[in-house]
Amino acid sequence: MSFDSLGLSAELLRAIHDQGYTEPTPIQEKTIPVILEGADVLAGAQTGTGKTAAFTLPMLQHLNARNRGGGKRPVRALVLTPTRELAAQVAESVKTYGRHLRLTSAVVFGGVSINPQIDTLRRGVDILIATPGRLLDHANRRTLDLSKIEILVLDEADRMLDMGFIHDIRRVLALLPDNSQRQSLLFSATFSAEIKKLADRLLNQPILVEVARRNTTADRIEQVVHPVDKLRKRELLSHLIRSRNWRQVLVFTRTKHGANRLAQQLGRDGINASAIHGNKSQQARTRALAAFKSGDVQVLVATDLASRGLDIDQLPHVVNFELPNVPEDYIHRIGRTGRAGHEGEAVSLVCIDEHKLLRDIERLLKQELPRDVLSAFAPDPRIQAEPIKNGRGGAARGGAGRSQPGRSRSQTGGGRPSRNKRNPEGRQNSRAGAARSRRRSRTRSA
Ligand code: AMP
């Protein structure tokens, strides 16, 4: 199938052609015609499927067709994203696909000065891409009027709920025209009961579009588990990077502190690495990402929160240095590779403490991940499982066994207990009672 048959205008087809895309991805093929018809859409699509273009292209077409020009432009389309990185990424796509149209766009998120954003909004924009916290900040300061919104997009809605944005989303909805007066599109990788509830509230007789089976990982990603002792993970990672000549590797750790420490240790091994996480300023995050994309930095060590929205074309290797506490995060993490038709490899370094987390992930995937024990790094059978420390001074979840009071801290490999009592990425040790921490993390991430 070609893009020509989807009903897109010549200007948009030209922008698609400029990008070198020859055919629509499945989500684009299914959603673009129904959005062009004006329907509300509930779309199930993971990151990496081409979902951004799936909503951006028809959105641009509608706005352009109804473009009245002249005078100050009211914001007519709003795209909400969970993270700054994703907001920046979507904003870039809006500019790329809209390059032959006379529409204006802006992106607003927290962590940077609000004043330049106020100036931009004052001049008037057609399309606004925003994280919920900063958007509400603008609304409260009355530097933004959302009453003329014609199209609303919630991107990665499942992630927004995971991050505790539901109250902010409700507040934003209250500022918009009624759902019969606007077109609403909700994109989510997974459909939980919470997402369905949100969809009921947000969407008006939506068309359901699903491209990948729920909770499945992209086909083109080769996944492998290397069992290894916790204290030898860094050594194994350096070995893999060197011996396999990996040029661009995204590595996930569970905590910000762990990300910093690993980047430093890799640096000492002579491997050029940077860390990216929620404690870094927006400028530092953007800089690290740009250096990684350009190849100046070989290894980017990231936490889950910071990883959302990272769109790096053809990223060949993702490494789970530590497995995530929340199994769904595994899918989001490895979705950073194998994007848009390219092959990718996702390697997990799993120590004995993480066996329960691995089982949870495999249960979610409905698939057992292949194990490959590298002989030089075979786990020591004498080491027993320890509860996993999440930087909360010993709070544990997911460890397969009992604590070993007799073992020293360095043996258990948990590192220094964090002086910071808060969970480093706003993550909870269990889903229960997560809301409070999520609310806290929200303020820091948006
Ligand atoms: P997304 O799922 O929106 O994050 O997109 C993932 C990647 O796919 C981005 O790097 C896009 O540039 C790329 N992409 C989007 N649509 C297409 C297409 N039709 N053909 C090839 N690549 C695409």
Image: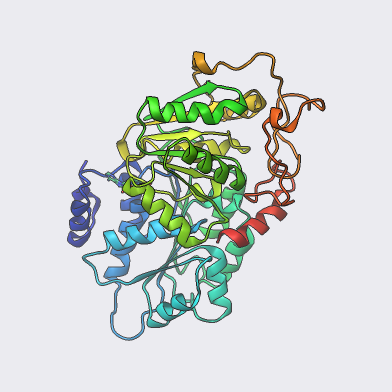
Please tell me which residue is depicted at 57% across the width and 43% down the height of the picture.
261
> Which residue is farthest right?
405
Residue 429 placement (x, y as % from top left): 70, 41
Residue 142 placement: quadrant:
bottom right
Please tell me which residue is depicted at 32% across the width and 49% down the height of the picture.
294
Residue 75 placement (x, y as % from top left): 41, 74
Indicate left or right for 209 with 331 as reference.
left
Indicate left or right for 58 with 322 as reference.
left
Please tell me which residue is depicted at 75% across the width and 43% down the height of the picture.
393
The quadrant in which the C terminus is found is bottom right
Residue 40 seen in the figure: no
Residue 32 seen in the figure: yes
Q: How is the image coloured?
A: rainbow
- Where 191 sits versus 173, above or below? above
Please tell me which residue is depicted at 22% across the width and 59% down the height of the picture.
12
The quadrant in which the N terminus is found is top left
Residue 33 placement (x, y as % from top left): 31, 52
- State the residue in front, 197 or 110: 110
Indicate left or right for 198 with 287 as reference.
right
Residue 395 placement: quadrant:
top right
Number of numbered discs on residues: 0
- Where 243 sits versus 159, above or below? above
- Where 46 sits versus 278, above or below? above
Residue 53 placement (x, y as % from top left): 33, 52
